[in-house]
Amino acid sequence: MAELGAHLTAEAAGDDRPSIFEAVAQDSLMAAVKPALLHLVKVLAESNPGRYGLLWRRFDEIYVLLDFLLQQHYLARCSASFSENFYSLKRIPTGDCKQQPLATAGLPKKQHWKSLLLLILVPYLKGKLEKLVSSLREEDEYSIHPPSSSWKRFYRAFLAAYPFINMAWEGWFLIQQLCYILGKAQHHSPLLRLAGVRLVRLTAEDIQALEKKLAVAASSQTHSIKTQVQSAVRKALGGIAFSLSTGLSVCVFFLQFLDWWYSSENQETIKSLTALPTPPPPVHLDHGVDSALLPKLKTVCPLCRKVRVNATALSTSGFVFCYRCVYNYVKTHQRCPITGYATELQHLVKLYSPES
């Protein structure tokens, strides 16, 4: 049985196609880097909201910019994305090429820009869409809009259709991967097909050409300002790429450590920590121009200065507000009105009393 299925994952003699494991592994590489960076930025923003709050609020845009520079560098230098080059793969135009172009030759201009846009924009737009769906579901759960509003009918229809749209999207990728495993397709991903390229392994000639290109670039001694600026930019991009590649193992270890720390084996330790006395209010209070001051009465909302309605606490700071007041504030400013701590809508916790 194993011999009959071995052809599904092993390449044939003379076949330059990567196995499905290599193709899927390089796809998941960049997907693992972004959550690790996001967690790091979140920790920095919570420790110092004034200095790192902008990084947290604009993380998606900053990450897209860095990803654009990184992928542009590798596509121009190696005819591959960062993760594809990490697994010794390259992109070549789709078609029956008798002789493959070297990795140092680069992709044709059309395929280059298609590849770059699909590598950058598709994950960015998909992440934004998932955040929008999550926000709309929270609004629908807590009834922010009147029941009869046209906007609420629209986004309820959108929320009902989104699972089917997402299922069709994931099914498209799954079918493409099955066709690739069975040898019926040249691409394991529909995005490669849209870009007009396919993945192949680096050859010995490719590796020699890349090493020679690197040696020539290092030995060039041109003193023009333009060349020096270009060289500095290339060195900076190379440093970023090297940092990402060498720090990948550390990020993976860190994620595995977090998974172990919050596993079931450590639940008793976490429960013992929650049994401690209630801590005092946060010491850091951001008394800026837009910051709210604490009222003297504990039943008054710090934002509207009225008796709280539908009391809601922020898990990041512990202060309590009216739900509508704090929802609108956090949605606009992404921070606690009192402390300035970085806060998201998922940190809102509704409080219930016996009277209600």
Image (spheres, helix red, strand yellow):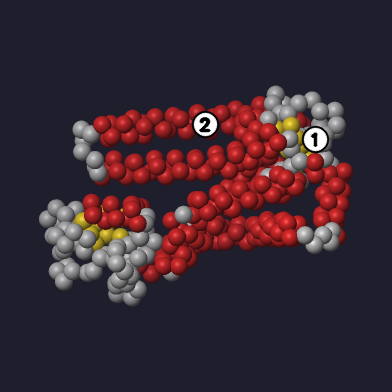
The image shows residue 44, relative to residue 104, as above or below, that is: below
| Residues packed near mark 2 inside 10 Å, few (<14), some (14 to 19) or many (20 plus) | few
- Residue 47 position within the rendered picture, expressed as x and y whole percent measured from the top left: 44, 69
The image shows residue 222, relative to residue 150, as above or below, that is: below
Q: Quadrant of residue 145?
A: top left
Q: Which one is in front, 204 or 334? A: 334
Residue drawn at x 21%, y 56% is 322
- Residue 18 position within the rendered picture, expressed as x and y whole percent measured from the top left: 74, 37
The numbered disc on residue 169 is 2
Residue drawn at x 71%, y 48% is 74
So how many labels did they put on this image?
A: 2
Q: Is residue 23 left or right of residue 126?
A: right
Q: Which one is in front, 214 or 84? A: 214
Residue named by callout 1: 16
Q: Is residue 142 left or right of residue 227?
A: left
- Residue 325 position within the rendered picture, expressed as x and y whole percent measured from the top left: 23, 54
Extreme residue in the front direction: 224
Q: Quadrant of residue 156?
A: top left
Q: Which one is in front, 260 or 314? A: 314
- Whether residue 347 is visible, yes or no, is no
Q: Quadrant of residue 305?
A: bottom left
Which quarter of the figure is the N terminus placed in? top right
- Whether residue 124 is visible, yes or no, is yes
Q: Is residue 85 left or right of residue 315?
A: right
The image shows residue 95, relative to residue 200, as above or below, that is: above
Marks 1/2: CA–CA distance? 28 Å
